[in-house]
């Protein structure tokens, strides 16, 4: 196994990612959110505002539909109220870009979290889900986020602060997906017209199909060594040369395995690498902002990669870090309806030989 893949072991955070049903009448006793929980919820919104401006370079508004939840209740922020099941207005609110947003309370039913347009989500305290999901015939998306009372159970009490930081970054990751999902679903619908694809598709599709194939893993590992070499290079000409070799290796891997009834997997890989790469880039930037003083970017990268749970997340982050160095102005392209393959963007950057003037700053702590 290559250097790149060997550091990408599965870590603590698999962020995928008994129930009390309350009376929804006006005389119901309304549970309260404690101050530390509200502080974490507000920090998540503050970070998303910063991510939009600093990293994605898009307007922060409109705020996505966000569903915070614990074992008993959900608190909806900026929902489509007409779609909600029985609910209560809460006395609590959060602020986003200076505007107050009231929280709306919805009780779980049969131990499951109600979400719009799809089946309710089981509450798994051992693996609390944080995820962006589409609704409204895939034209819109929402985001679910477990509250600290749930995810603090994943580790000892002295790790609570680390978990708060970890889930803060994961929230930025999933909120980034709310900006992409409608476009990605449209691209996948077009692929289904051309190819016979599995009914269930997610960012682990390549890993599930080829993870036990020795030849695939060998080629994948050799390709990974080249991506590692490109990332570690300090001279931009060396970066381009190593990235070009890695691109040739990726072409050979695709030509060898993404054929016949798997021909559509090449485009699927590109879609998921673009989505996960952008989301992981945002999570990486959040981690850099909170990294210990003096920590180099590669240490932050490896730490984050070890906590990821999909090849597409690990590889997508590596590709976006290289794109940041070689392709200035890439941000808008990855948030467009017809967003490109990261491989294609790198090929263009290598041909053009352009240099991103912000490349060094972007890998340091964001406030530097």
Image: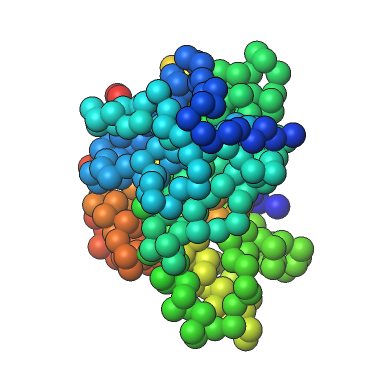
| Foreground residue among 3 and 174 | 174
Q: Nearer the viewer, residue 235 or 186?
A: 186
Residue in the image at 62% along x and 68% along y: 200
Indicate the quadrant containing the C terminus: top left, top right, bottom left or bottom right: top left
* Rendering quarter of residue 128: top right
Horizontally, residue 27 falls left or right of residue 72, namely left
Above or below — where is 113 with respect to 94? Answer: below
How did the renderer colour the structure? rainbow
Residue 264, located in which quarter of the rendered image? Answer: bottom right
Task: State left or right for residue 151 relative to residue 90.
Answer: right
Q: Where in the figure is residue 285, as x and y percent of width and height?
A: 40, 35
Q: Is residue 257 above or below residue 61?
A: below
In the image, residue 74 sits, relative to residue 118, either above or below, namely above
Name the residue rendered at 34%, 47% in the picture.
324
Residue lying at 29% horizontally and 51% vertically, measured from the top left: 331
Q: How many marks?
A: 0
Rendering coords of residue 250 (x, y %): 53, 67
Residue in view at x 51 percent, y 34 percent = 25
Above or below, comparing residue 350 to residue 58 in the picture: below
């Amino acid at each position: 196994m290559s250097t790149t893949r060997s550091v990408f072991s599965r870590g603590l955070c698999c962020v995928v990612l008994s129930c009390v049903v309350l009376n929804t009448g006006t005389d119901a006793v309304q549970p309260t959110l404690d101050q530390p929980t509200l502080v974490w919820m507000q920090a998540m919104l503050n970070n998303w505002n910063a991510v939009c401006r600093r990293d994605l370079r898009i307007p922060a508004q409109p705020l996505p539909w966000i569903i915070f939840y614990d074992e008993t209740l959900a608190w909806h922020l900026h929902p489509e109220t007409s779609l909600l099941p029985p609910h209560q207005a809460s006395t609590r609110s959060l602020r986003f870009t200076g505007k107050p947003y009231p929280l709306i309370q919805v009780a779980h039913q049969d131990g499951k979290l109600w979400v719009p347009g799809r089946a309710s989500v089981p509450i798994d305290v051992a693996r609390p889900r944080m995820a962006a999901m589409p609704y409204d015939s895939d034209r819109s998306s929402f985001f679910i986020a477990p509250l600290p009372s749930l995810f603090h159970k994943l580790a000892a009490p002295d790790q609570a602060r680390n978990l708060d930081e970890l889930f803060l970054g994961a929230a930025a990751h999933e909120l980034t997906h709310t900006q992409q999902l409608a476009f990605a679903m449209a691209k996948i619908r077009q692929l289904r017209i051309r190819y016979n694809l599995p009914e269930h598709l997610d960012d682990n599709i390549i890993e599930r199909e080829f993870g036990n194939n020795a030849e695939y893993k060998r080629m994948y590992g050799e390709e990974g060594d080249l991506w590692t070499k490109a990332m570690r290079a300090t001279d931009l000409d060396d970066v381009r040369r190593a990235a070009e070799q890695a691109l040739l290796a990726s072409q050979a891997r695709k030509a060898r395995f993404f054929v016949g009834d798997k021909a559509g997997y090449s485009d699927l890989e590109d879609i998921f690498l673009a989505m996960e790469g952008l989301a992981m880039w945002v999570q990486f930037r959040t981690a850099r902002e909170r990294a210990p003083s003096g920590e180099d970017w590669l240490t932050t990268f490896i730490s984050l990669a070890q906590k990821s749970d999909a090849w597409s997340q690990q590889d997508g982050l590596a590709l976006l870090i290289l794109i940041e160095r070689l392709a200035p102005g890439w941000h808008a392209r990855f948030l467009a309806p017809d967003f490109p393959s990261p491989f294609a963007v790198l090929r263009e950057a290598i041909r053009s030989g352009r240099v991103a003037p912000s490349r060094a700053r972007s890998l340091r702590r964001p406030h530097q």
